[in-house]
Image (cartoon, rainbow, N blue to C red):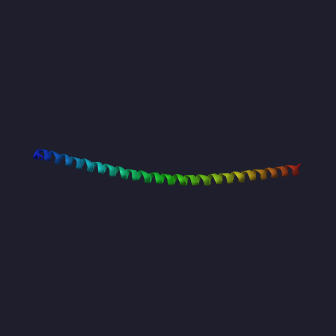
Amino acid sequence: MFSIHHRSAIDKRFILLNVIYSRSRETVNAKDREIASLRRQIDSTSEELTEVGRGREVALRENRRLQDDLNTMTRENQVCVCVCVCVCV
């Protein structure tokens, strides 16, 4: 059927294909690990951004509250100054 020389060539090709397959499989596994790592990094970054967003919202609410307090105090001070000026005159 096949000569010994032909059989040897087929065996060598088979071995070569197995080596190529093994290397390809290793490469795919490495890429799968890299993808998993990148997904973890994305998840972590997403969580951090969510926390930053929450902190930003808290800071904005606090800023609004302080602005409201400042406006209230400014109005009260203006009324007090007006009353003092009116009384003194």
Q: 44 or 64, which is in the foreground? A: 44
Tell me how many marks there are.
Answer: 0
Q: Residue furthest front?
A: 1
**Residue at point 20% right, 48% down?**
14
Q: Is residue 55 left or right of residue 35?
A: right
Task: Point out residue 26 in the picture as x, y percentages from the top left corner.
Answer: 30, 51
Q: Nearer the viewer, residue 59 or 73?
A: 59
Residue 78 falls left or right of residue 58: right
At x 50%, y 54%, the residue is: 47
Between residue 10 and residue 56, name the one nearer to us: 10
Identified at 57% across, 52% down, the residue is 53
Q: Quick one: which residue is furthest to the right in this view?
A: 89
Q: Nearer the viewer, residue 57 or 35?
A: 35
Residue 85 x, y percent position in the rendering:
85, 49
Look at 38% across and 50% down and name the residue there: 34
Residue 83 at x, y percent in the picture: 85, 52
Pinpoint residue 11: horizontal percent, then vertical percent.
17, 48
